[in-house]
Amino acid sequence: MSTDLRDVAIIGSGFAGSLIASSLAEAGMDVVLIEAGLPIEDERHVRQWRREIFANSDEAEIFAPYADLLAPQDREYKSEYYVQEATGADRFEGQYLRLAGGTGLAWLGTALRMCPNDFRMQTTYGRGRDWPISYADLEPWYCLAEEATGVAGSPEADVS
């Protein structure tokens, strides 16, 4: 076992862990990322995705060529890295692969901000609870995350 000391250990190399690690390293800290998942080889990952999505597709279905998400699917990854937590007849088919990169591997580029009134639900609508922070408190962090992930939009298209 290594006895090397680091300033910070971060569990998980997904978006959150990677962005935090990058920020801390840029500030001069010695950071280590600890990842439970397998390293992902891009070519193998794409091949696996294509096989799973298209192999079980039914062209008669409206969403063809995409597969029935409930259909059995072969996986190259070791079973301990494939996690399906839901059970029962009406289960939500939630699943994920525990791989280096975390949710960044399945991210669709959707990065919606909460609206200012989302933080003031009780005050504005008489329902739920108000957050202990405001949109204005969070807004600089939204900007940093959007810059780091490459999210962009047109101010002209903003209808808020």
Image (tube, grey):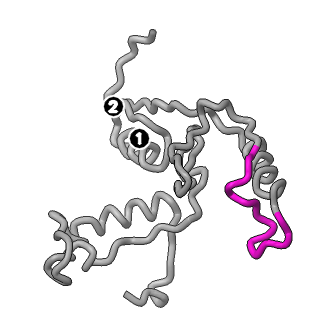
Q: Characterize the local packing of mark 2: few (<14), some (14-19) or many (20 or more) Cα atoms within 10 angstroms.
A: some
Do the numbered discs 2 and 1 sit on residues whose CB atoms are within 8 Å? yes
The mark found on residue 21 in the picture is 1
Residue 22 quadrant: top left
Q: Which residue is mark 2?
A: 8
Q: Which quadrant does the N terminus fall into?
A: top left
Q: Residue at x 31, y 28 (%)?
A: 7
109, 95: nearer the viewer: 95
- Percent x, y for residue 48? 77, 46
The mark found on residue 43 in the picture is none
Kind of residue indicated by mark 1:
Ala
Judge whether 61 appears above or below 94 on screen: below
Q: Characterize the local packing of mark 1: few (<14), some (14-19) or many (20 or more) Cα atoms within 10 angstroms.
A: many
Q: Earlier in the sequence, mark 2 or mark 1?
A: 2
- Residue 66 inside the magenta-drawn segment: yes
- Residue 64 inside the magenta-drawn segment: yes
Q: How many marks?
A: 2
- What is the span of residues highlighted in magenta in the rendered image? 58-73
Main secondary structure type of the part rendered in magenta: loop
- Name of the residue lying farthest toward the front: 89
Q: Residue at x 80, y 47 (%)?
A: 47
Q: Is residue 95 left or right of residue 133?
A: right
- Percent x, y for residue 120? 19, 76
Q: Residue at x 22, y 66 (%)?
A: 137
Q: Is residue 70 left or right of residue 65?
A: left
Residue 68 quadrant: bottom right
75, 156: nearer the viewer: 75
